[in-house]
């Protein structure tokens, strides 16, 4: 008798309900994740028993129960097949099960749904009080005086021409030559990446990301059914030797990265690494999406892959959600000319027309000088807050990976033996939302790290909660 069975008082052998239920749950998970679509043949009883390390009788019982539920169908002499209509897509079921404290979708929900009583040093945006509220209200009053078409009609597929012209000039300041006809407005940076993934990859294609990287890259690529491959990120960019190894092993179609101010580490790409990276991309026919939404937080200009490459195989995206307003949804894509028509068709298919009112607001704020003044003051304020937060964190044993980087984030290591996910769980019980390192790390190698948004760290309670959580 195997470990998958037990005997009743009458001597009848029954299968372990736990093993049978676990086997059934594995099949349900594969159906939910669409790795077993309707009509797909299930593994043979022998093969599945071997992979699950259970007895064949356990698999037989699991298959029979699933067939009774209608989840699968038996074809005598042929095997078992997934049944029914296509299961609704469940991102949580795609990929390995993650502890909620480090699941990208759960971390995002914690930050987005947190009420006023919650402190949010783990979120990725500025406090509302740090945004140019007076300038936004002036721009709204200007927009309210626009004609009826501007207030009520769809925007053009590419987006407001004057804003695209201004964005072309701004990109030129970073050495990126893009005509207005190479720029498409989007609702956000996330929508820009979503459109590009629809345009460039198919389910099952490999996509490289930095390890660690912005955690929503993981969730978005899961939605596109991509095979996500992480490459360790250093203080000067991705580890080039391991990047080359990943190219050879996985033959990816795409690489998504930040190069100006990296999220979450605050690193800046070095010119040497950028040059080697582009050579590898050319040799491997790799396309790169360069997410540059933190560009305006820079203290000094960093190398841009799109500038070195000339928008050949590098696509540049950006948005104003982090610097201006997360409510005014306006981003952009700067891409090769040959791609624009296809991207336009995709935008029409997925959103029809663009958000004209948001584009008008952004254009007004860029043209009247209020955005430039806001960013000049914001960089000074962030630099001061970065220094203060770093000093405060060091005093309780939390060490920044880079000392006073530009932007919002401090990527910090905890003392030896302290797990960031556990600290995040304890802090959440005290109404503090943290961002543990493994939410950003595909390999799960950042368990000792937390990402802090310094603009959200003004409240002294955060540090008291951290200190208490680490001492338990």
Image (cartoon, rainbow, N blue to C red):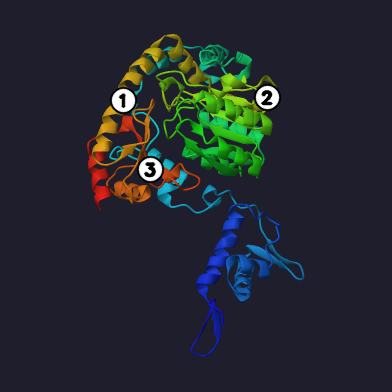
Q: CA distance from mark 2 to mark 3?
A: 39 Å
Look at the numbered discs 1 and 2 and tell me whether their residues touch, using CB distance below 8 Å: no
| Residue occupying image coordinates x 49% and y 26% | 270
In this orientation, does residue 221 appear?
Answer: yes
Residue 129 numbered mark, or none = 1
Q: For this view, does 364 lie left or right of residue 191?
A: left
Mark 3, Cα crowd under 10 Å, few <14 / some 14-19 / many 20+, is: many
Decide: is 359 above or below 244: above
Q: Residue furthest bottom?
A: 10
Q: Residue at x 67, y 60 (%)?
A: 82
State the image coordinates of residue 411 (x, y, percent, origin top left): 38, 36
Q: Point out the tag, 2 or 3, that comes first from the N-terminus.
A: 2
How far apart are labels 1 and 3 at the CA level? 28 Å
Q: Is residue 140 left or right of residue 82?
A: left
Q: Secondary structure at mark 1?
A: helix
Q: What residue sits right under mark 2 in the picture? A: 339
Q: Earlier in the sequence, mark 1 or mark 2?
A: 1
The image shows residue 136, relative to residue 94, as above or below, that is above
* CA separation in Å, label 1 and label 2: 39 Å
Residue lying farthest to the top in this orientation: 368
């Amino acid at each position: 008798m195997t470990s998958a069975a037990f005997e009743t008082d009458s001597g009848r052998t029954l299968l372990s309900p736990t093993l049978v239920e676990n086997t059934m749950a594995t099949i349900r998970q594969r159906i939910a994740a669409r790795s077993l679509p309707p009509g797909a043949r299930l593994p043979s009883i022998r093969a599945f028993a071997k992979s699950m390390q259970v007895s064949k009788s356990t698999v037989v019982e699991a298959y029979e129960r699933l067939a009774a539920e209608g989840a699968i169908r038996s074809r005598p002499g042929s095997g078992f097949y997934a049944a029914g209509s296509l299961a609704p897509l469940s991102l949580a079921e795609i990929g390995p099960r993650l502890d909620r404290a480090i699941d990208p979708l759960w971390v995002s929900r914690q930050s987005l749904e947190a009420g006023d009583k919650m402190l949010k040093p783990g979120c990725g945006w500025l406090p509302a009080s740090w945004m140019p509220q007076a300038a936004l209200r002036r721009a709204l009053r200007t927009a309210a005086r626009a004609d009826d078409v501007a207030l009520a009609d769809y925007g053009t597929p590419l987006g407001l021409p004057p804003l695209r012209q201004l964005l072309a000039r701004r990109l030129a300041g970073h050495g990126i030559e893009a005509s207005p006809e190479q720029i498409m407005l989007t609702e956000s940076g996330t929508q820009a990446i979503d459109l590009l993934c629809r345009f460039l990859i198919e389910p099952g294609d490999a996509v490289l990301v930095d390890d660690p990287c912005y955690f929503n890259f993981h969730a978005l690529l899961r939605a596109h059914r991509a095979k996500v491959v992480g490459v360790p990120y250093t203080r000067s960019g991705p580890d080039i030797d391991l990047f080359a190894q990943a190219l050879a092993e996985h033959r990816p179609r795409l690489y998504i990265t930040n190069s100006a101010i990296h999220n979450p580490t605050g690193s800046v790409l070095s010119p040497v690494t950028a040059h080697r990276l582009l050579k590898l991309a050319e040799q491997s026919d790799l396309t790169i999406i360069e997410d540059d939404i933190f560009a305006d937080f820079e203290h000094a200009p960093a190398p841009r892959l799109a500038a070195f490459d000339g928008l050949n195989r590098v696509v540049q995206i950006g948005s104003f959600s982090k610097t201006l307003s997360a409510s005014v949804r306006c981003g952009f894509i700067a891409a090769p000319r040959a791609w624009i028509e296809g991207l336009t068709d995709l935008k029409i298919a997925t959103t029809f027309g663009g958000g004209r009112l948001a584009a008008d607001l952004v254009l007004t704020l860029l043209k009247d000088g209020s955005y430039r003044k806001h960013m000049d003051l914001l960089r000074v304020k962030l630099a001061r807050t970065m220094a203060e937060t770093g000093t405060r964190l060091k005093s309780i044993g939390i060490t920044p990976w880079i000392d006073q980087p530009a932007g919002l984030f401090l990527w910090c290591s905890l003392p030896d033996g302290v797990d960031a996910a556990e600290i995040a769980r304890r802090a959440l019980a005290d109404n503090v939302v943290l961002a543990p390192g493994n939410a950003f790390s595909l390999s799960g190698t950042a368990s000792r790290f937390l990402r802090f948004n310094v603009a959200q760290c003004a409240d002294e309670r955060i540090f008291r909660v951290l200190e208490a959580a680490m001492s338990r």
